[in-house]
Image (tube, rainbow, N blue to C red):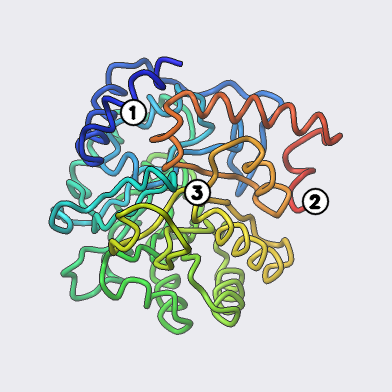
Amino acid sequence: MFYSLLRPALFLLDPETAHTASLAALKLLPGGAQTPGPLATTVAGLAFPNPLGMAAGYDKDAEVPDALLGLGFGFAEVGSITPLPQSGNPRPRMFRLLEDRAVINRMGFNNGGAEAAAARLARRKGRGGIVGINVGANKDSLDRTADYATMVRLMAPLASYLAINISSPNTPGLRALQDEAALAALLDAVLAARGNGAVSNGAQRPPIFLKVAPDLEPADVDAIARIAMDKGIDALIVSNTTISRPPMKSRHAAETGGLSGAPLHDLALERLRTFRKATGGALPLIGVGGIASADQAWARIRAGASLVQLYSAMAYEGPGIARKVIAGLERLMKRDGFTSIAEAVGSE
């Protein structure tokens, strides 16, 4: 209720300023990992206290992962982080589509770089909780595959898992890394950089997740699924924002960039189903895109997602959305007669 009163004032600010204000507010809150409950599930060898995560893009510089966990999220994914700091694209670069409950962004991997983020993440070591690190390449890099390998080497000791983001539409040419030959070479480099066994501090090597775009042809889906399984990738995150434009009402609907929020829901759900079919259920999937309620999260799980993430919905629903969705998932799981999230995955 408090957020519903505060939201009109926040929405008087431009979206990027409001986002910065929300990060500042979260820094004032106590943080901490959730206690495993009825929704606890294991994916890629990681024990998640519940299946709902904060997607990458909210906490780009790993400033508030513990505060996000304290809001009720079962895991938080920080980033995207690039080797060198970069300012991103010119402002304005984020737009609220109020009538459509959506966001368009063309941020361009703006972040403070790997060194600063690694220092923050090193300070939280030992606090518990699952914090994934989403890594990207610098816009002006001459060798983007080398950028990803560098990020994996730097972040592996600090990450619960590493998410390889090759699907942002806001770095020119990045999505070309989803092409078959480029993807195979990239994953070879990433896996070599991570290595096998234990890292120097005794922790296990983190699982590798691959984040893909929703704007893929059937042949692309089949190729990505095959390569990911052949290379031993641990999960696919389906999906990033879309460059497509379904019918929308907002005056900002024609802005360039990645579209997220409610209009992405149907496409992201469809893409999850196609990847479920392409992988035959052999590879864990993380469902992202347009999720704003327990019913939508449950539908994504029933369609094949072992975990789900949200981001844009928090701008409209407020920080209480995580506990609301988790409570709803518990009710829905009980209603449908499942004893665990794992049992419900792909059961539609």
Tell me the residue that label 3 is attached to. Answer: 262
Position of 264 with respect to 94 (left or right) is right
Q: Is residue 309 above or below residue 171?
A: above
Residue 38 percent location from the top left of the image: 71, 26
Q: Distance between the residues labelled 1 and 2?
A: 37 Å
Position of 142 with respect to 58 (left or right) is left
Q: Which mark is residue 347?
A: 2
Q: Residue at x 58, y 41 (%)?
A: 46
Element at label 1 = loop
- The answer to which quarter of the image holds residue 189 is bottom left
Q: Is residue 326 above or below residue 205?
A: above
**Closer to us: 190 or 264:** 264
First of labels 3, 2 by sequence position = 3
Q: Do the residues labelled 1 and 2 touch (CB within 8 Å)?
A: no
**Closer to us: 80 or 322:** 322
As shown in the figure, which amino acid type bears the numbered disc 3? Ala
Position of 53 with respect to 120 (left or right) is right
Q: Residue at x 38, y 24 (%)?
A: 67
Element at label 2 = loop
First of labels 1, 2 by sequence position = 1
Residue 128 percent location from the top left of the image: 46, 27
As shown in the figure, which amino acid type bears the numbered disc 2? Ser
Q: Which mark is residue 124?
A: 1
In this rendering, which labeled residue sits more in front, label 1 or label 2?
Answer: 2
First of labels 1, 3 by sequence position = 1
Q: In this view, does 18 lie above or below 310?
A: above
As shown in the figure, which amino acid type bears the numbered disc 1? Arg
Position of 256 with respect to 345 (left or right) is left
Task: Give the farthest residue toward the right.
Answer: 337
